[in-house]
Amino acid sequence: MYKKNPVFRFFSSVELALFTLCLLALTSIIGTVIPQKESMSWYIQNYSESTAKIFQVLSIPDMYNSWWFLGLLGLLSLNLIVCSIDRFPGVWKQVKADNLATDLKRLPKMRLKANWVSSVSEKNLSTALSNTLASNGWKTEQRTRDDALLLFAQKGALSRTGVYIVHASILFIFLGAIIGERYGFKASVMLPEKEETSIVYQTGTGKPIELGFTLRCDRFDIEFYETGMPKTYRSKLIVTENGKVTLEKSIVVNDPLDYKGLTFYQSSYRGYQDFLLTITDQESNIAETVILPFQEQKALTKHNATIGIINAQAMGETITNMKVWFKDDSSPASVFWVDAGDKVTVEREGKTFTIAGKQMYATGLQIAKDPGVWVVYTGCGLMLLGLYVAFFMSHRRIWLLIRKENGETTVLMSGSTNKNKTGFETTFRALSTKLKADT
């Protein structure tokens, strides 16, 4: 009775699905054209105060979480569920149908059919036909019907469910997106070299979020084109918990760090006017790293020495080399140039030092937590499977009716398919020719 209900018919209609999909496509353009999750002042500045108020009423700044957009997704989901409830039982009935109970009068009326006569006995003929079909991937069933023997074989019965696999995949994707939005977040942090943090800041709101562990940027390296544009940049990140290092990884763009459901992406950087210098005594192999402001001196406690940057050369905002002043307990002081990222060897009285220097940077990280991502991936996998089943597979069926007439054995072969009729016709003709030849 529910199928006759007008409300049920409305929510299961194809027209509703097309209408909802069109609305989602059109409104998604709005979310693409108008930047999302900016401040109210930003929208007033870039549009107008009245327009910004309309945006606020319609939740345009956070459109994909707005009540009306989620309502459209809910309406589409309801349509898919009701449509599947309405149509799937009939499709499943076709998949599980007893094709050996098919009305024998239908077989001669099918578009694809072939007839031939064989001198082989009915029993031996059915065996030969079954073996030939099996060798071509067709598993047969048989039943005696009206003094005749009916053989049946099929392929791709489950291809009729392809569209419902696609329906399920869309629901999986929606569910994964809801889980990700409800229990996940996006955040960012600017982390200077040699510093650590256990807090990141939510994108849009700036709300601090505790990581539950400590993240340290041990080193940041950057390469430039000759024009001065950045070529590649890399951050060496160290994760610690309870004072113990649990993970180390150097990340670049498109190769993030994953830890405890969080993904840290390399997204940007910031250069400082400070320098990172590492001084190593080659004899004792004792190394000391210091952060040194421009034109300031710093004492090296491990080496009983003093070091400073007295000059630097730059390309734009990027330091290319620096002039270092270095003095230990022997005299006089050594003054030399060091290329950024390179090192020099300094000979002192009875000692040899290696000094490496570079500009200090902060790495800009984007952090994402999306617990629904595997649900979305499952939905995408189901969608690919459903589309393949729906468009590249078909339900192909073959009947072989064997009768004993006037001392001869006659064979009627009939076939049908729900899709790709031209392709199946070629298969049917080739198979019927082979079956004739083998019997």
Image: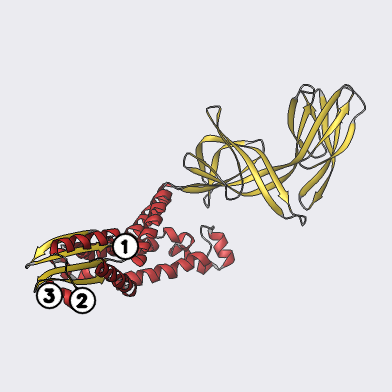
State the mark number for residue 414: none
Q: Position of residue 4 (x, y in %)?
A: 16, 70
The amino acid on which the numbered mark 1 sits, given as a three-letter code, is Gly
Q: Check disc 3 and report its element: helix, strand or loop.
A: helix
Q: Nearer the viewer, mark 1 or mark 2?
A: 2
Name the residue rendered at 42%, 52% in the picture: 377
Q: Which residue is mark 1?
A: 162
How far apart marks 2 and 3 lie (CA) works out to 10 Å
Name the residue rendered at 27%, 69% in the picture: 437
Image quarter (top left, top right, bottom left or bottom right) of the C terminus: bottom left
Q: Position of residue 144 (x, y in %)?
A: 10, 63
Tell me if I can see residue 96 in this picture: no
Q: Which residue is mark 3?
A: 105
Earlier residue among tags 2 and 3: 3
Q: Quadrant of residue 10?
A: bottom left
Q: Check disc 1 and report its element: helix, strand or loop.
A: helix
The relative height of residue 198 versus residue 171 in the rendered view (above or below) is above
State the mark number for residue 110: 2
31 relative position to 434: left or right: right
Name the residue rendered at 35%, 58% in the picture: 169
The amino acid on which the numbered mark 2 sits, given as a three-letter code, is Met
Q: Position of residue 201 (x, y in %)?
A: 54, 45
The amino acid on which the numbered mark 3 sits, given as a three-letter code, is Lys
